[in-house]
Amino acid sequence: MPKLGMEPIRRKALIAAAIDAIHARGMAHVTMGDIASRAGVSAGLAHHYFGGKEQLLLATMRHLLSELGGEIQTRLAEAKNPENRIRAVVRGNFAAGQFCPTVISAWLAFYVAAQNDAEARRLLRVYARRLESNLLHALRELTSDDKAAQIAEMAAALIDGLWIRRSLSRQSADPDSAIELVEGAIFGALSLPDA
Amino acid sequence: MPKLGMEPIRRKALIAAAIDAIHARGMAHVTMGDIASRAGVSAGLAHHYFGGKEQLLLATMRHLLSELGGEIQTRLAEAKNPENRIRAVVRGNFAAGQFCPTVISAWLAFYVAAQNDAEARRLLRVYARRLESNLLHALRELTSDDKAAQIAEMAAALIDGLWIRRSLSRQSADPDSAIELVEGAIFGALSLPDA
Amino acid sequence: MPKLGMEPIRRKALIAAAIDAIHARGMAHVTMGDIASRAGVSAGLAHHYFGGKEQLLLATMRHLLSELGGEIQTRLAEAKNPENRIRAVVRGNFAAGQFCPTVISAWLAFYVAAQNDAEARRLLRVYARRLESNLLHALRELTSDDKAAQIAEMAAALIDGLWIRRSLSRQSADPDSAIELVEGAIFGALSLPDA
Amino acid sequence: MPKLGMEPIRRKALIAAAIDAIHARGMAHVTMGDIASRAGVSAGLAHHYFGGKEQLLLATMRHLLSELGGEIQTRLAEAKNPENRIRAVVRGNFAAGQFCPTVISAWLAFYVAAQNDAEARRLLRVYARRLESNLLHALRELTSDDKAAQIAEMAAALIDGLWIRRSLSRQSADPDSAIELVEGAIFGALSLPDA
DNA sequence: AATGAATGAGTTTTCATTCAT
DNA sequence: GATGAATGAAAACTCATTCAT
């Protein structure tokens, strides 16, 4: 069975399996055995490639973060004006790959893990800051700095809040209505006279 | 040393200890020993009073939910018009007892636990529905049913999103600015002409 | 089964069991299960009381060292002149409790462990220094400082060498002939004219 | 890349690596991977050449024994009288190749391993007997059989004891002073009148 | 009422060993 | 001849839970 060049294949499979396993059993109850068997390998191999459970989980988180980053960057690259850059960020956050039940579960689990794991917290902060800075820059071209900051904060909270609520309802998550809601809130706020 | 009537005292202490422990170590790593020693009792006793770890955790969740419910009800009782009822719900959600780091951690942890625990999910849904229904009723007196539904959904997502973001930043959570933001979003949306 | 005040009893039993187990299977192959079952308890309990395998082994080493120290101190207390103090140290080293196969095995194993474990090395150095200093003081009253140092070094090496050789031969270790040999070498060297 | 005639090169490299690894991590913690990577090969290859960990370790021990034997035989071949034969044995035991930290660690480790491994014990006994018999024959030409036996035993113990102590101190082992000490003890004892 | 003792099941982790390539 | 892939068994360790006192 052993073939050459399996390492990247196994790593990917294990990360995908970790997302599945977190969705199915919850971060608090996943075991290496769970994950490994979902990936079709032995627990020993998962250890061998990642060095331990914690590191496999962290690698999974990094994967999620970089997928999300990719979705946003792709869209940003095509956006030619501030309005479209805002839309790029919002839509990237609700992209198909991101907004499915297993991925949502994993995201949420990492959010919580970040409360108690320094490295996870660091990773998440980098993402949060980048998201807000992308929004902020686009908003500043459309309104005052103060208002831009307010709207950016609201938008970020709204995105996270919609995620968390969709994860709970477990109904087939509907990205389009979420996008509509967030964009509505942002452009609605922009259209308002200053408070 | 055993005293009479200790049960309610112990139960309260253990629930408070569970919240602390979840904040300090994360849901995935709390042990009965953790919780018990924070409450100043033996693990065996925690067991004795709650019947097991799962049940102690569920009791903790119920406590959190009922505290939040209380904060909202108190404020609703004093609200005489729709605007104030909306404010009551928002402010209840960011009440002092709720918006401190340990409680936020615990809330978040339960949100995640609810993904994989039927009873936790049921409890959370009851709360979510009540929150939305309170908001919805008040909003319907101020706008169309459709728009009320949209705004209610947005408000709920915003509240959850702000929580989750504050928990991550770990900076001294500031309820007032959160309240301002949410109320601004709600009343801003209400003031907009229909899309 | 659980009784109060078992901790010291279990600790002693586990340390004794560790010595047995090291003798029977060799330091490289002892398992916590081995030791625990020899002590008549579960492996979990051994962990509970000592915190881990390494610490149980270190506690065992400390026990051995303190036993030996006791044997020597007892004899030193009764020795009224330098010759007798020398004898006290030598005989303490070959005392009954020390010179039996299981204890010899354990000692030897710790000697080797000390090569790669900082804490074990520290413990052993303390013992080695004390042994040599005891001998040295007594010898200095009987000869020149230089010669005393030489003889002390030789005596210490001889004691260790005899131990190691007895352990290998596994024949019923005979403390008396060992004592005779070491004392003969020391007093023989003392009687020699300076080189 | 596979080359012909690699076998003896690999075997030597692996044995040298085993000695290093034992010194660095201790017999109880060496792994095949440790050894193999120090030798610059895969663990699988080490296995292939020696048939298993145990056998590689035994081969390493045999190597050590034969090196020591060589050092002694070379010196014995040049010794023309009993005194020089004694010196040959002593100096062979403290020969440069033998008296360095890594080799001492490995020797010591094997001494201990011999407690619980029949084959290792057998190998060590052969060496011990040869050492003692070489000394004994030389001593018998210089004194009574009884005294020769006593001195031989003492000398052997002294050699082992000095090794073990040097290994512990980890200071740059000084073979010359060790040789002086042992020869001093032997010739000192020989010069003494019968007890 | 409360504890400390104890266990056993479950999890992570490590490694020698095997094997296809 | 040599490797990297993979496993499985064994070991350490953790912890909820039980129970005698």
Image (spheres, coloured by chain):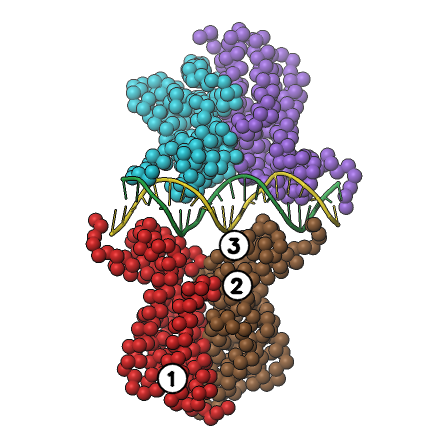
Chain colours: A cyan, B purple, C brown, D red, E green, F yellow
- Asked if labels 3 and 1 share a chain, the reply is no
Whole-percent x and y of residue B13? 67, 37
Mark 1 and mark 2 residues within 8 Å of each other at the beta carbon: no
Q: Are marks 3 and 1 in contact (CB under 8 Å)?
A: no
Give the letter of the chain under mark 1. Answer: D
Q: Can residue C116 be seen in the rendering of this structure?
A: yes
Which residue is found at the position 45% from the left and 62% from the top?
Answer: D117
* Quadrant occupied by the N terminus of chain A: top left
Name the residue beneath numbered marker 1: D137
Q: Which residue is mark 2?
A: C23
Q: Is residue D67 left or right of residue C67?
A: left
Question: Which of the 4 image quadrants contains residue D158?
Answer: bottom left
Q: Of tags 3 and 1, which is closer to the observer?
A: 1
Mark 1 residue crowding within 10 angstroms, few (<14) / some (14–19) / many (20+): some
Q: Residue at x 31, y 58 (%)?
A: D14
Whether residue A113 sits left or right of residue D50 in the image: it is right
Return the residue nearer the eye: C176 or C191.
Answer: C176
Q: Amino acid at mark 2?
A: His
